[in-house]
Image (spheres, helix red, strand yellow):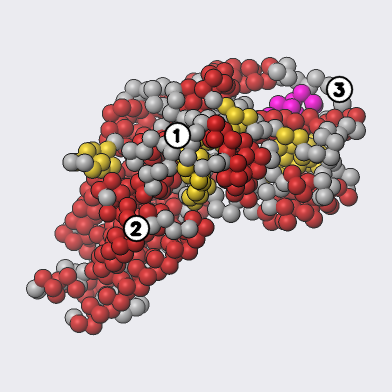
C-alpha cells in the first residue's frame, strides 16, 4: 500500500485529525484537490474571457454536478475498496424504467419514478449481494452487470416502445412537478442554478456526515483499508458493502430522473463510458484506487475540476480537434499538483 | 430476494406492455399495410443480410432497418441484420454472412479500409453487394453493385446554401462523435458553401448533459453565433435547451429527423432539418438486391443513388409528424 494511505487501524481511531486548523487541513485527503481546483480556476480565469461570468460559472457548476452526483457515492464505494463499472448505464436504465413504466401504464409519472427507484436499488443490491456472496472481484461482477444492463436498456426499449428511444411523457400527469424536483433551475440574483447542483451539495453533505460522524463511516474506511482485520474486530463487512452499492444506485436514480425530466425522451444507448468519468472524478479528488482512503468532498472537488477543465477549454476557444488532448493534459497537471501538495502535507505532519 | 424484486418490476413493466399491445399491433399493421403484410412476389425465399457501423440504440439505424424489413416482407426475403461500430468487427460480421452463403449483402463503408477485403471477397464469392449510407466514393472500386445514400458533402453544401438564404452570419457545427468521417464531411460541406463563418465543436454524444453544457459554454463565450447546427436529430432539442440557458437567440438547425424534431419545426424552435431519408436507404437496398437477383437490374448507372438531402421546414413538418412517430421517417 502506498505511503499516503494510513493503515486502517489508525484510520479507525484518528480519522478526523485533531489539533490546530492548519494541522487538521493538512490531514484532509481533499487538500490537494482543492489546491488543484484553485489552480485550474485561476488558469482559465486568465486565459478565457468568458470564464468569469456568472452565467459561465453556472454552466460549469451544472456540468460538474451531473458528474459529481455520481462521483460522491462512487468515491464512498472506492473508499470501501470496491468498483462499479455499471454506473453509467445504470443511470440510463433508471431513466428508461421510469419513462416506460409511466407511459405504458398511463400512470402518473411519479409512479414510474417510484418504480424506477425500487428497480434501481434492486440492481444495486444485486451487485452488492453477488459481491459479498461470491467474493469475486467487483470489477468482474459489475462488468457483467454493465453488459446486462446495456443489453436490457436496448432490448426492453425496443420490445416495449418499438423504437430505440422512449416516447415523450411530457404531456402526462405529474410531469411538471417531477420536472421541478429533478430538472428545474432556480434564479438566484442574475444567476440560474440548475437543481442538480442542489442535489449534488445535499449528497456531498450526507456522504461527508456518514463518513466522518457515524459508525458506518468507520466501517467504510475499515472494509476498504483492511477487510479481514475489520471483520475480526466485528465490522459488518457484508452489510457495509451492500449499503455502498445501494448508495451508488440511489445517486444513479437521481441522475436518471434528471436525464428523463430534462429531455423527456431517453435514448436507450446512452451512458456508456460515463462510469469512467465518475471514477476519474473520485481519483482526482484524492481517493485511492486501492481503497481505504479518500473523501466525499474530494470527489466533489474532483468533479468540479473535471467540469471546469471540460468547459474551460471551450470558453478558451482552443482548437476543437485538440480538445481531448487539452482535457487529458489539464487533468494530469491538476492531479500532479494535487499529488505534490499532498506529499508535502504528509511530510510536514 | 433481488431476483424476485427484479422479476416483479420487469413483470409489471411487461404487463404494461401488453396493455398497449393493441395499439402496437395496430401500428405494425399500418406499417405493413404498404406491403399488404405478405410477400407480393413468388420468387424463392432468398436471404439478404445487412451489416452497418451503427452503435447500440441508434434511432437513425432503427429507421433504416424498418425500411429494409418492410421491403423484405414485400419481396419474400429473409432479412438478417447485424452491426458494430468497430471497422474490424464489422468486417468479421460480413465474413460470417459470406460463410453462411447469403444471397445478398448490404453494407456501410464508414471505415472503408477495414471493409475493403471482405467486400471484395463477397464479390468474388458471387454475392451481390449494395453499399448504403457511407462509402459512395469507394463503393464501385470494391465491387459493389450500387451505392444508396446521401453524399455527406453535398448534404453539407445544401445546409450552407440554406443558411445563406436565411441570412445567417456565424454558425457552430456540433460533432457528436470524434473521428466519424461522415460527420466531418457534413461540417466541411456546410462551411464550403456558407458565406458566414463556421466553427466546430466536439461533444460527448453518449452524455446528453455534457452535450448541453458544452454548447452552452460555447454560446456564452461567443455571442456572435447565430446558428447552431447539430448533426443528429436527438441533439437538436438539447441544443435548443443550451441556447435557452445561455440566453442566446441562435437558430437551431439539424441533420436527420425524429418525432421531436418534427414537433419542434412546427412550433418554430428549430429552423430546418436536412433529411437523408434513412427509411429509403434500407428499403431501396433490399429492393435493388431483389431486382438484381430476379432481373439482373442495376440502378444508378455506376453512380450513387442519392436519398438526400431534403430540406425540411415548418411547412413540410406537419405532414411528416405522423410518419416520424411510427418510426419510418
Residue at left offset 49%, top offset 55%: A320
Q: Quadrant of residue B317?
A: top right
What distance separates the C-alpha of mark 3 from that of mark 2?
Answer: 68 Å
Vertical relation: A171 (above or below) A54: above
Residue at left offset 43%, top offset 61%: A327
Magenta stretch prevailing secondary structure: helix
In the picture provided, is A113 more to the left or to the right than A144?
left
Vertical relation: B81 (above or below) A111: below
On the same chain, marks 1 and 2? The answer is no
Q: Quadrant of the C terminus of chain B?
A: top right
Q: Which label sits on residue B177? A: none
- Secondary structure at badge 2 equals loop
Near mark 3 (Cα within 10 A), the count class, few <14, some 14-19 or many ≥20, is: few
Residue at left offset 80%, top offset 26%: B76
What distance separates the C-alpha of mark 3 from that of mark 1?
Answer: 51 Å
Q: Which label sits on residue B42? A: 3
Magenta span of residues? B66-76
Pinpoint the chain carrying mark 1.
B
Q: Which residue is denoted by mark 1 in the rendering?
A: B251
Q: Quadrant of residue B65?
A: top right
Vertical relation: B107 (above or below) B323: below
Percent coordinates x, y for residue B250 in the rendering: 42, 36
Among numbered discs 3 and 1, the one appearing first in the sequence: 3
On the same chain, marks 3 and 2? The answer is no
Percent coordinates x, y for residue A341 in the rendering: 27, 75
Amino acid at each position: 500500500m502506498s505511503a499516503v494511505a494510513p493503515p486502517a487501524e489508525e484510520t479507525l481511531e484518528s480519522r478526523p485529525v485533531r489539533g490546530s486548523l492548519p494541522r487538521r487541513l493538512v490531514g484532509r485527503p481533499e487538500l490537494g484537490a482543492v489546491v488543484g481546483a484553485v489552480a485550474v480556476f485561476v488558469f482559465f480565469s486568465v486565459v478565457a474571457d468568458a470564464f468569469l461570468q456568472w452565467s459561465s460559472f453556472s454552466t460549469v457548476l451544472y456540468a460538474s454536478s451531473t458528474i459529481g452526483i455520481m462521483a460522491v457515492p462512487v468515491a464512498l464505494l472506492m473508499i470501501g475498496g470496491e468498483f462499479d463499472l455499471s454506473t453509467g448505464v445504470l443511470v440510463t436504465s433508471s431513466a428508461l424504467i421510469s419513462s416506460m413504466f409511466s407511459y405504458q401504464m398511463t400512470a402518473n409519472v411519479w409512479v414510474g419514478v417510484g418504480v424506477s427507484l425500487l428497480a434501481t436499488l434492486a440492481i444495486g443490491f444485486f451487485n452488492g449481494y453477488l459481491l459479498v456472496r461470491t467474493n469475486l472481484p467487483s470489477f468482474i461482477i459489475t462488468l457483467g452487470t454493465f453488459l446486462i444492463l446495456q443489453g436490457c436498456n436496448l432490448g426492453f426499449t425496443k420490445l416495449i416502445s418499438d423504437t430505440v428511444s422512449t416516447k415523450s411523457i411530457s404531456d402526462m400527469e405529474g410531469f411538471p412537478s417531477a420536472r421541478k424536483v429533478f430538472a428545474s433551475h432556480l434564479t438566484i440574483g442574475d444567476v440560474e442554478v440548475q437543481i442538480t447542483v442542489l442535489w449534488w451539495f445535499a449528497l456531498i453533505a450526507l456522504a461527508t456526515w456518514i463518513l466522518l460522524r457515524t459508525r458506518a463511516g468507520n466501517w467504510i474506511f475499515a472494509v476498504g483499508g483492511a477487510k479481514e482485520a475489520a471483520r475480526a474486530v466485528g465490522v459488518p463487512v457484508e452489510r457495509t458493502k451492500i449499503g455502498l452499492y445501494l448508495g451508488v444506485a440511489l445517486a444513479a436514480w437521481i441522475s436518471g430522473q434528471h436525464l428523463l425530466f430534462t429531455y423527456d425522451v431517453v435514448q436507450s444507448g446512452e451512458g456508456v463510458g460515463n462510469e469512467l468519468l465518475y471514477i476519474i472524478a473520485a481519483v482526482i479528488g484524492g481517493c485511492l484506487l486501492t481503497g481505504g482512503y479518500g473523501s466525499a468532498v474530494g470527489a466533489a472537488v474532483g468533479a468540479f475540476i473535471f467540469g471546469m477543465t471540460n468547459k474551460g477549454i471551450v470558453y478558451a476557444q482552443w482548437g476543437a480537434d485538440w480538445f481531448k488532448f487539452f482535457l487529458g493534459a489539464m487533468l494530469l497537471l491538476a492531479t500532479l499538483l494535487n499529488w505534490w501538495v499532498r506529499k508535502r502535507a504528509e511530510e510536514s505532519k | 430476494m433481488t431476483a424476485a424484486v427484479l422479476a416483479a418490476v420487469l413483470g409489471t413493466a411487461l404487463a404494461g406492455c401488453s396493455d398497449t399491445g393493441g395499439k402496437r399491433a395496430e401500428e405494425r399493421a399500418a406499417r405493413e399495410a404498404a406491403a399488404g403484410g405478405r410477400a407480393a412476389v413468388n420468387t424463392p425465399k432468398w436471404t439478404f443480410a445487412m451489416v452497418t457501423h451503427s452503435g447500440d440504440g441508434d434511432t437513425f439505424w432503427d429507421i433504416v432497418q424498418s425500411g429494409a424489413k418492410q421491403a423484405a416482407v414485400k419481396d419474400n426475403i429473409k432479412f438478417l441484420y447485424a452491426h458494430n461500430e468497430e471497422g474490424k468487427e464489422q468486417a468479421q460480421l460480413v465474413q460470417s454472412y459470406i460463410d453462411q452463403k447469403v444471397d445478398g449483402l448490404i453494407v456501410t463503408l464508414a471505415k472503408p479500409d477495414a471493409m475493403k477485403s471482405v467486400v471484395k471477397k463477397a464479390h468474388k464469392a458471387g454475392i451481390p453487394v449494395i453499399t448504403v449510407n457511407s462509402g459512395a466514393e469507394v463503393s464501385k472500386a470494391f465491387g459493389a453493385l450500387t451505392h444508396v445514400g446521401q453524399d455527406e458533402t453535398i448534404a453539407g453544401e445544401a445546409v450552407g446554401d440554406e443558411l445563406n438564404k436565411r441570412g445567417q452570419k456565424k454558425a457552430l457545427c456540433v460533432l457528436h462523435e470524434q473521428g466519424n468521417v461522415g460527420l466531418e464531411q457534413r461540417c466541411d460541406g456546410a462551411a464550403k458553401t456558407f458565406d458566414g463563418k463556421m466553427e466546430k465543436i466536439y461533444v460527448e454524444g453518449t452524455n446528453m448533459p455534457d452535450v448541453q453544457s458544452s454548447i452552452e459554454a460555447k454560446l456564452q463565450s461567443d455571442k456572435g453565433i447565430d446558428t447552431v447546427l447539430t448533426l443528429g436529430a436527438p441533439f437538436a432539442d438539447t441544443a435548443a435547451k443550451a441556447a435557452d440557458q445561455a440566453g442566446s437567440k441562435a437558430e437551431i438547425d439539424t441533420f436527420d429527423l425524429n418525432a421531436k424534431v418534427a414537433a419542434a419545426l412546427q412550433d418554430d424552435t428549430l429552423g430546418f432539418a436536412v433529411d437523408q431519408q434513412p427509411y429509403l436507404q434500407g428499403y431501396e437496398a433490399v429492393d435493388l438486391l431483389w431486382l438484381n437477383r430476379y432481373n439482373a437490374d442495376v440502378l444508378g448507372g455506376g453512380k450513387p443513388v442519392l436519398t438526400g438531402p431534403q430540406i425540411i421546414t415548418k411547412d413540410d413538418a406537419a405532414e411528416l409528424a405522423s410518419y416520424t412517430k411510427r418510426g419510418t421517417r
